[in-house]
Image: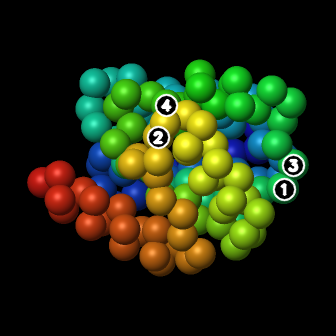
Amino acid sequence: MAHTVRPTQHPQCVQIEIHGELTFDDMTCSAELGLGQGQPRWVLLDVSEMDVALPEHFIEASRKSWFMHPDLVHMAVYTRSSLLGSAARMIAKLTRSRERMTIHDSREKAEAHLRDEMLKAGV
């Protein structure tokens, strides 16, 4: 398993860190993230230690991944790689989920953005 899921200070927000190569398991860990319980969730996705390579059939698999789960309100992606940031923007566009994802170059900016999104939602 190339990911680690951690709680945050807010019960409706969770953090997932992906290390090394992205796998299908990383893309389908909805239950670990608390998705599927009928509660809105905000996710901090840390890909700062992820390899740039994407798995075979990534675009098709992304349509079935937790990225598309209806309980996911917003995902703030933290990456230091401009290439991964560009890939994330492309995937968001292809999966029609641009409004649910933002890309940040620091963990602090990603966390602050999620706090703002949750405040706007009244949680």
Q: Residue at 70% of width from left, 24% of height from top? A: 60
Q: Vertical placement of 30 versus 89: above or below? A: above
Q: Secondary structure at mark 3?
A: loop
Residue 79 appears at what percent x and percent y?
A: 65, 66
Q: Secondary structure at mark 2?
A: loop
Number of other residues with Cα within 10 Å of mark 4, as a class: few under 14, some 14 to 19, many 20 or more: some
- Residue at the disc numbered 3: 53
Q: Secondary structure at mark 1?
A: loop
> The residue under label 2 is which amino acid type?
Ser
> The residue under label 3 is which amino acid type?
Ala
Q: Residue at 55% of width from left, 44% of height from top? A: 92
Q: Nearer the viewer's eye, disc 4 or disc 1?
A: 4
> The residue under label 4 is which amino acid type?
Met
Label 1, label 2: how far apart the Cα atoms are: 23 Å
- Residue at the disc numbered 1: 51
Number of other residues with Cα within 10 Å of mark 3, as a class: few under 14, some 14 to 19, many 20 or more: few
Q: Is disc 3 in contact with disc 1, using a CB cutoff of under 8 Å? A: yes
Number of other residues with Cα within 10 Å of mark 1, as a class: few under 14, some 14 to 19, many 20 or more: some
> The residue under label 1 is which amino acid type?
Asp
Q: Secondary structure at mark 4?
A: helix
Q: Earlier in the sequence, mark 1 or mark 2?
A: 1
Q: Earlier in the sequence, mark 4 or mark 2?
A: 4
Q: Earlier in the sequence, mark 2 or mark 3?
A: 3
Residue 100 appears at what percent x and percent y?
A: 41, 47
Label 4, label 2: how far apart the Cα atoms are: 8 Å
Residue 87 appears at what percent x and percent y?
A: 70, 52
Label 3, label 4: how far apart the Cα atoms are: 21 Å
Q: Vertical placement of 84 versus 4: above or below? A: below
- Residue at the disc numbered 2: 97
Q: Nearer the viewer, residue 84 or 25?
A: 84
Q: Nearer the viewer, residue 98 or 105?
A: 98
- Residue at the disc numbered 4: 68
